[in-house]
Image (cartoon, rainbow, N blue to C red):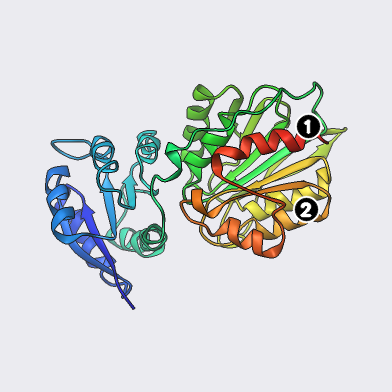
Amino acid sequence: MRQIRVLVVEDSLVFRELLVQNLNKDPAIKVVATARDPFEARDAIVEYKPDVMTLDIELPRMSGIEFLRKLMPQYPLPVVVISSLSERVFDALNAGAVDFVAKPSGATRAQIEEFIKKELQVKIKVASVAKVGSWKKTPMATPDQPLAANRNDMVVAIGASTGGTEAIASVIKEFGSDIPGVVIVQHMPPGFTDMYAKRLNERCQVAVKEAKTGDLVVPGQVLIAPGGDAHMQLVKVNGAYQVVIKRGPRVNGHCPSVDVLFQSVAEVAGDRAVGIILTGMGGDGAKGLLAMKQAGARTIGQDESTCVVYGMPKVAYELGAVEYQEKLPDIAKRTYSLLSKM
């Protein structure tokens, strides 16, 4: 089995050595080089030709984000960002990083080693099969016409994982205030979902917020499930859609889980829903999307050519859960088209 060649870019000597030692414990990974700053990293990329780069955002001489912006157009490379709790991680994803992990703060050596084993090694393996930056050059398809008023009885449910932060943003930026209430599960660490929602809220026509129990699902608003140890489900109370956030075990290795959300939408909204499954590793959401389709909902899956990782949409397609397979720039238009016929 060919090992994944990794370049570690980290200015802290102690943390850099911990990364190298523990990443090399995985037989599928080999750290071929390290760098303390973007200038050393640039030379290492040319010399060692790594498959994946791990990148700290806070670096001397040039920030990790600025480095990404200069690097990706000329040398596209799967990058996993290692970041403290900061909105800047989304700038890194926008600049071309595939994914990120939350840097342990005040952790013991044993906790850091556990973080590398349980989180970073997995993200590196996912990144090694990811495509970088291909869809971003494609113009978005504009919806043909606004929807009629009073869409309170409809819901749009979206699920995504690796590559999903940018994919979700590109879809909901095309949504107007006429879109029915939107509920989203994006696999993301605790704390980051609130920042992600606020960032989207500033950049989109629709209102976007991190969900909490009792939030109404109303037209023109997007609710994003909080990262952590709870699932988001759709319920109907006094004739109105709401969400509940319930603590529970991981489903398909995730909490929140796309499957849990989609299953609840199938049960509660039936044929008054559109389900969308976007880029991501694994199969979370596939069975839930099938349940939605079987309940009469319309379903969309992102196509392979525009996915960072064609995992979740592929599993859903193979299950027969996907009614329309669309390139990312066409998903919003297809959503409007399906809603207009409901």
Outermost residue toward the right? 238
Tally of marks: 2
Residue 182, image x and y in percent? 67, 35
Whether residue 21 is visible, yes or no, is yes
Q: Decide if residue 305 is on the left or right side of residue 36.
A: right
x, y percent for residue 127: 38, 57
- On the rendered structure, is 81 left or right of 238? left
Q: Which residue is mark 1?
A: 340
Considering only vertical position in the picture, is 62 above or below 112?
above
**What residue sits right under mark 2 in the picture?**
293
At 43% from the left and 39% from the top, the residue drawn is: 136
Q: From what the image shows, is residue 229 above or below residue 287?
A: above
Badge 1 amino acid: Ser
Q: Nearer the viewer, residue 213 or 44?
A: 44
Disc 1, SS: helix
Quadrant in which the N terminus is drawn? bottom left
